[in-house]
Amino acid sequence: MSQAIYFDWAVSTMFGWGVYGLNLIRHWSDVAGTPAYTLAQLHLESLAGMDPLALRAIAQKLVDSDVLRIERLGAAARSRPLDGTVLHALGNKFSGSTLPSRGGPTGRATVGMIFFEDTNLPDAATVARDYDLIVTGSSWCEAVMRSQGVSNVTTVLQGIDPSLFHPGPSAGTLAGRFAVYSGGKLERRKGQDLLLLAFRAFAARHPDAVLVSSWHSPWPVTALTVNENAGIVPLRLGADGRIDATNWAVENGVPADQFIDLGTVPNHLMARVLREMDVAVFPNRCEGGTNLVAMECMACAVPVILANCTGQRDLVATGAPYPLDRLSPATRVDFGTDGWGECDVEEILEMLEYVYAHRDKARRRGEAGARAMEALSWRNQIGQLHRALAPLGVAAAA
């Protein structure tokens, strides 16, 4: 019989881990016949505006999760193994979840789910022995771990929700404009500073061009890492602690009427925005996963330009994106950056010019991206996770 899944991160529509958790709750029972529960605090406010039928379908699981969380607040309950498989969320240097050897939750099987960018992984092989299996979010992450002596590791890519992210008609809200999309939380790792420099030159040549950004996150202080690029005017946080993306773009030479800051947009509302875009650009220096935002753009048939390095290489391998190949080594202080790539600003500009001049060809590349993402629905990928866990005693679905 299949086991229930217990994961120790929040359910939310506002950040990647939260979207992963939401889809575990939605789809685990479909592929395994048993429920999935979160042990973390629910971010119910982020679910406002979701399809009411989809929300109704998971409502009882959310209630049951919160009851379980409250029951486990006591020290004795926290130390008791759960009757199922427990998933831990891990990041750089195995941060995030409390390791099993240090009192973190355990079950019949205990699995680490890891997305990292810092390739300095202290005592990786020792930490990995705390887990029955480590599941990474990209083939690059898996390769880094294997190079550091970890053998109990496999890869399961993230997914997209095809009921939301799919090709469809534009609403025409940016009619007459050439819309360039940039998404993901603002930080040095995601390379928005490089795109801003390329777009400044592109906008000067094309008054119809507009850069549409969704860079906000619950962790605005990480945005200050873009200031490591001495070639830009530094970003400053506002008095409220939030980023002022428009002011930063204007100070770096992008006209105010050629920049749109979307603010904070929940995941279930993004598809309608993406279908208005002519191209999406991701000159990310590193991605521990494939880049979920880029996957969602591809699913909506938006032509995608992205750095051919780290986790994004799994998307380049589909043949659909326009790869940025002129990469130099990228570095960060006190950070392992093996495999990171620094995109060439001129190549970003050249790619933008190519898409601008070849709209029909770009549209076909976008359509190829949508076809590639059909195989990576969340339901399919949760099924892949289920099969990866099967050797641990999680029975295959009927």
Image (tube, rainbow, N blue to C red):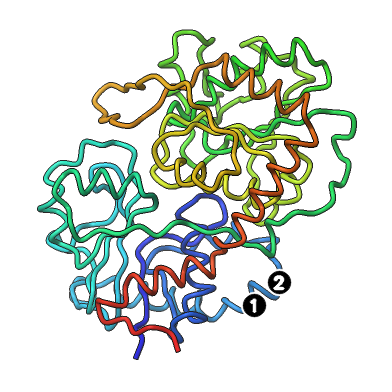
Query: Which residue: 50% across, 78% down?
Result: 61
Residue 111 x %, y %: 26, 66
Tell me if residue 272 comes above or below residue 337 in the rendering.
Answer: below
Query: Which residue: 27% across, 60% down?
Result: 112
Mark 1, Cα crowd under 10 Å, few <14 / some 14-19 / many 20+, is few
Judge by depth and name the residue closer to the eye, 263 or 277: 277
Q: In this rendering, would 104 be left or right of 85?
A: left
Q: In this rendering, would 313 be left or right of 323?
A: left
Residue 247 x %, y %: 65, 18
Q: Quadrant of residue 89?
A: bottom left
The answer to whether residue 221 of the structure is visible from this angle is: no
Q: Which residue is mark 1?
A: 56
Query: Which residue: 35% across, 64% down?
Result: 8
Amino acid type at image mark 2 = Pro
Residue 71 x %, y %: 33, 78
Q: Give yes or no for contact between labels 1 and 2 (Cβ–Cβ under 8 Å).
A: yes
Amino acid type at image mark 1 = Arg
Res 52 label = 2
Tell me if residue 318 comes above or below residue 76 in the rendering.
Answer: above
Query: Which residue: 70% across, 15% down?
Result: 202
